[in-house]
Image (tube, helix red, strand yellow):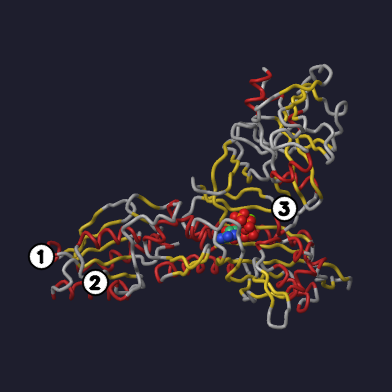
Amino acid sequence: MDYSKLLLPTLKEEPAEAEVVSHKLMLRAGMIRKLAAGIYSYLPAGLRVLRKVEAIVREEMNRAGAQELLLPAVQPAELWKESGRWEFYGKELLRFKDRHERDCCLGPTHEEVITDLVRRDIRSYRQLPINLYQIQTKFRDEIRPRFGLMRGREFTMKDAYSFDADEAGADESYRKMVDAYVRIFQRCGLEFVPVEADSGAIGGSFSHEFMVLAESGEDAVAACRACGYGANVEKAEVRAPEPEPVAAAGPMERVDTPEQRTVEEIAAFLGVPPSTVAKTLLFETDRGTVAVCVRGDHDANPTKVKNLLGANTAELAGEAAVRQVTGAPVGYAGPVGLPVPVYLDQALRGAGGWVVGANQAGSHYRDAVPGRDFRAAGWADLRTLRAGDPCPRCGQPIAVKRGIEVGHVFKLGTKYSESLRATFLDAQGTERPLIMGCYGIGVGRTAAAAIEQNHDADGIVWPVPLAPWEVVVLPLQVKDDATARVTADLVRGLEAQGVEVLVDDRDERPGVKFKDADLLGIPLRLTVGPKGLAQGVAEARERKSRAEHRVPLAEAAAWAAAWVQERRT
Ligand code: ATP
Ligand code: MG
């Protein structure tokens, strides 16, 4: 492909709008352009990379026995009402009406549509198991679209859905997808870890996320070096602390704490350790508002709150709600006399009497004791695991790292087959609900994650399997006949061996061309320059290692093709 004819608009300047490296480099390398918040056009170089990711995904899904189909992006509300998600999916679901005033949405995910398809066309256990997948555009009206393709509103996802007759079959389908995912992300050249995850809005019984480890990751991942346990910290269990003898507490007393708001301030002001100051946080959930007390130096975990209540959503209450429930400004909530259920984190056991907010500005209680001074709805693991906490499996100190979630596999069970009545007849002729799994991969996010892990000061450093072109041929004097002849021969030789070649035929200074080749991250560069020509060699340079080789022109195509071949997956 000739650079001069391509829409490949590279940028010298750092785009101000981009915060993370992958977003900056995708813009600078002319891969994407923004149309609106979270909505991007893919330019030729960007599309080539996405197609590479898709091809790997497709090959591995097919190898695992899944069948590709394509479902509509526009979905009728009726199906979502049947599953119950029309109500609870929230604002991420882009809803609209058609000309007949019928409610519709743009698919953020396709459990409803696939279950509807399968309930009509699958009747018998003989048709099971089956795994159906698509690679398609999703729309999620994300509250904070950012980081380019990493968190878009419109994005490409591979989503697969498995249907089985029994639990053992469903577990096997799940395992096959985990294996396929491991192969996919390995083939993409990524460093990743599969971790235990919360099932989130999709629902279901258990799930794993595939996390690409990178500083810019939006997720925190607990990873134990000793035993290999890994979990999203949303989900990671915290070990119950050893029971300690409870220190006897005196009677509860109210103390003035003017202008003391943070745990540190209050602990210092009252001369107590921060661990005996209990924070009280209000959560608004679809099962009502609840209060959660955690140790002052700990963080309450909304996912654990949600799961404890069996709720679909749990969010920290805003200022207005806090005022309404506690009658006090933010910073003074406490469990005593609170009109909502109060749940206590297990780490508070044994703390004796606590310092808690008195639901009044500038006022706290000391020596508040659950059971005596206020009613507790229950004790549970409600805090977020921290680096250095004991691993929930082996007890060794655990590390917390940043990760980008590129894939997510869920065991759904019968959640959707029951609500949508998708059943089959088993061997005995009994009607039973299908057992489902669902499996997603973000295509654009995977490409972005690859850049987060593979770049340097000069630009992208594509792993060969994801590179938009495998080799860039760079003639230095495009107007020189000998250069043109040698370049054309080289390109013909490479293409004859199936190598994807970009030819930088632009009449530009060498410096400009070298810079762009580096920015684009093409794994191998072959320069045809006057010095080399005189000696009958092409100058090869590896993008990643920067190693240079002088290769006789007659062998250059075969040499480069072999170099590429070795690095394909
Ligand atoms: P997140 O927690 O990051 O919002 P999710 O849990 O909502 O993701 P899933 O429903 O599991 O995502 O979707 C499957 C995959 O689709 C994710 O693993 C991710 O790779 C990708 N994905 C999800 N949301 C986005 C988005 N807004 N932009 C790009 N890719 C996305
Ligand atoms: Mg997810």
> In this rendering, which labeled residue sits more in front, label 2 or label 1?
2
Q: Distance from label 2 to label 1 (Cα)?
A: 20 Å
Asked whether the viewer can see residue 181, the reply is no
Q: Which residue is mark 3?
A: 206
Q: Earlier in the sequence, mark 2 or mark 1?
A: 2
Extreme left residue here? 534
User: Which x, y percent locates residue 17?
Assistant: 44, 56
Label 1 element class = helix
Q: Does the beta carbon at disc 2 come under 8 Å from ligand 1?
A: no
Q: In the rendered image, which quarter is residue 270 located in?
A: top right
Q: Which residue is mark 1?
A: 534
Asked whether the viewer can see residue 400, the reply is yes
The residue lying toward the viewer, choosing from 209 and 341, is: 341
User: Alpha-carbon neighbours of circle 2 within 10 Å: few (<14), some, or many (≥20)?
Assistant: many
Q: Which residue is mark 2?
A: 505
User: Which x, y percent locates residue 298?
Assistant: 66, 33
Q: Quadrant of ligand 2?
A: bottom right
Label 3 element class = strand
> In this rendering, which labeled residue sits more in front, label 2 or label 3?
2
User: Residue at position x 74%, y 42% from top?
Assistant: 322
The three-letter amino acid code for the residue at tag 3 is: Phe
Extreme bottom residue here? 100
User: Residue at position x 80%, y 69% from top?
Assistant: 82
User: Alpha-carbon neighbours of circle 3 within 10 Å: few (<14), some, or many (≥20)?
Assistant: some
Q: Earlier in the sequence, mark 1 or mark 3?
A: 3
Judge whether 326 appears above or below 55 on screen.
above
